[in-house]
């Protein structure tokens, strides 16, 4: 792996690595070693000084002092992570433009003519639309999944969409037929979902397939007894109200998983105080620890302990990862 991701050119990295191996090298020696003229070497070294990995040796104007990589490269990584986090947040904010642009693309007049119901019969078109709808979902997904245990292939096909919802902190509720608990593979998959925060219930009553996203769109089969015939994408407010009501009544009548309490104890949702939220916001904005500490009224040492604790809560190995995970949870 090279250092290009941290802003190094190939020439800069070449001289930097050379100086790490022989910090006493002068500009003249570097020029001879790498077949460069001294003007080029001085230019590259000046650029390395700008990156913060090199300093002039004040006692000898022709040699340099290499800054300890733990400090210099660590600072460059943090700077790059901050830039990426700011970019991530700006990109995420563009998500709110999607509905507006999608309405233009879909021609609202045409949608109004079909009564807010779209019919899809091709299985690939249905999968593509589910992928699209799930990508733009912001708050919740409610689904009813009839039938017994699913095959390994079906579970693996469902995993990307399920994990996307979990990562984004959506409220996810699923009702299954109780027979799924008779299969080890399905039971393990449900436990995985519940550990991620998904709420799952089961019932012995007959079920009809349905997925509701953000209480704004529902996906139901054209023929409840044969889902292979295709699906209806329903946006009509009156029809949606009925689907949401049906789901809520089915949810109230369904039963908790036998081991729900045990899993809930292991997967308590993280909470965040107003102060910790502010710390994460300052972290994401690129403020120094000193500035952030003054802003929230605590010592730098206490601030760093708090950041370390937040990183542990979020399962993050770096401040950048903590910022991304906090943004995914809607904390930023």
Image (cartoon, rainbow, N blue to C red):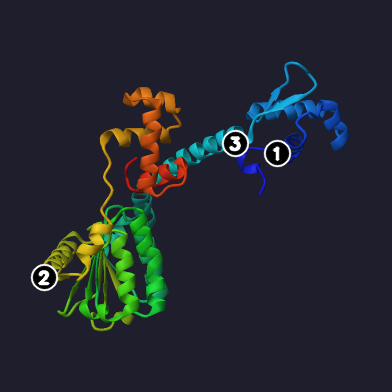
Q: Which residue is mark 2?
A: 253
Query: Residue at 28% of width from left, 57% of height from top?
Result: 267
Q: Which residue is mark 1?
A: 9
Q: Which residue is mark 3?
A: 70
Where, by quadrant of the figure, is residue 176 drawn?
A: bottom left
Q: Which tag, 3 or 2, sits closer to the chain's start?
A: 3
Q: Position of residue 197 (x, y in %)?
A: 28, 58
Query: Residue at 75% of width from left, 16% of height from top?
Result: 59
Decide if residue 308 is on the left or right side of residue 73: left
As drawn, 276 above or below 185: above
Q: Position of residue 190 (x, y in %)?
A: 30, 70
Q: Position of residue 283 (x, y in %)?
A: 41, 34
Query: Residue at 80% of width from left, 21% of height from top?
Result: 62
As drawn, 285 above or below 123: above
Say which quadrant the C terminus sits in: top left
Where, by quadrant of the figure, is residue 125 drawn?
A: bottom left
Numbered disc 2: secondary structure: helix
Numbered disc 1: secondary structure: loop
Q: CA distance from mark 3 to mark 2?
A: 59 Å
Would you call the spot at circle 3 few (<14 residues within 10 Å), some (14-19), or many (20 or more)?
few
Q: Pick whichever, 248 or 219, lies toward us.
A: 248
Examine the rendering and report whether any part of residue 122 can be seen.
Answer: no
Where, by quadrant of the figure, is residue 178 drawn?
A: bottom left
Query: Residue at 73% of width from left, 41% of height from top?
Result: 10
Which mark is nearer the camera, 3 or 1?
3
Q: Position of residue 19 (x, y in %)?
A: 75, 34
Numbered disc 3: secondary structure: helix
């Amino acid at each position: 792996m090279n250092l290009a991701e941290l802003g190094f050119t190939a020439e800069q990295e070449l001289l930097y690595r050379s100086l790490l191996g022989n910090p006493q090298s002068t500009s003249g020696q570097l020029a001879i070693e790498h077949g460069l003229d001294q003007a080029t070497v001085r230019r590259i070294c000046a650029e390395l000084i700008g990156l913060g990995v090199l300093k002039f040796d004040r006692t000898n104007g022709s040699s340099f002092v290499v800054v300890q990589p733990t400090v210099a490269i660590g600072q460059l990584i943090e700077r790059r992570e901050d830039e990426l986090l700011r970019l991530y947040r700006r990109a995420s904010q563009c998500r709110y433009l999607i509905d507006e642009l999608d309405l233009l693309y879909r021609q609202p007049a045409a949608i109004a003519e079909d009564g807010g119901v779209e019919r899809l019969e091709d299985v690939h078109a249905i999968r593509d639309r589910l992928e699209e709808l799930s990508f733009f979902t912001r708050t919740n997904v409610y689904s009813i999944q009839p039938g017994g245990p699913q095959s390994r292939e079906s579970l693996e096909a469902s995993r990307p969409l399920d994990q996307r919802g979990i990562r984004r902190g959506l409220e996810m509720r699923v009702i299954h037929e109780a027979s799924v608990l008779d299969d080890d593979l399905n039971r393990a998959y449900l436990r995985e979902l519940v550990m991620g925060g998904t709420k799952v219930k089961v019932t012995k009553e007959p079920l009809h397939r349905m997925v509701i996203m953000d209480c704004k769109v529902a996906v139901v089969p054209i023929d409840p007894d044969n889902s292979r015939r295709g699906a209806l994408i329903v946006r009509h407010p009156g029809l949606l109200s009925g689907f949401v009501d049906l789901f809520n009544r089915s949810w109230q009548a369904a039963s908790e998983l036998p081991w729900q309490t045990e899993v809930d104890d292991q997967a308590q949702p993280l909470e965040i105080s107003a102060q910790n939220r502010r710390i994460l916001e300052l972290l994401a904005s690129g403020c120094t620890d000193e500035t952030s500490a003054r802003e929230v009224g605590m010592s730098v040492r206490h601030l760093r302990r708090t950041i370390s604790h937040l990183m542990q809560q979020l399962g993050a190995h770096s401040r950048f990862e903590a910022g991304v995970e906090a943004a995914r949870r809607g904390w930023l």
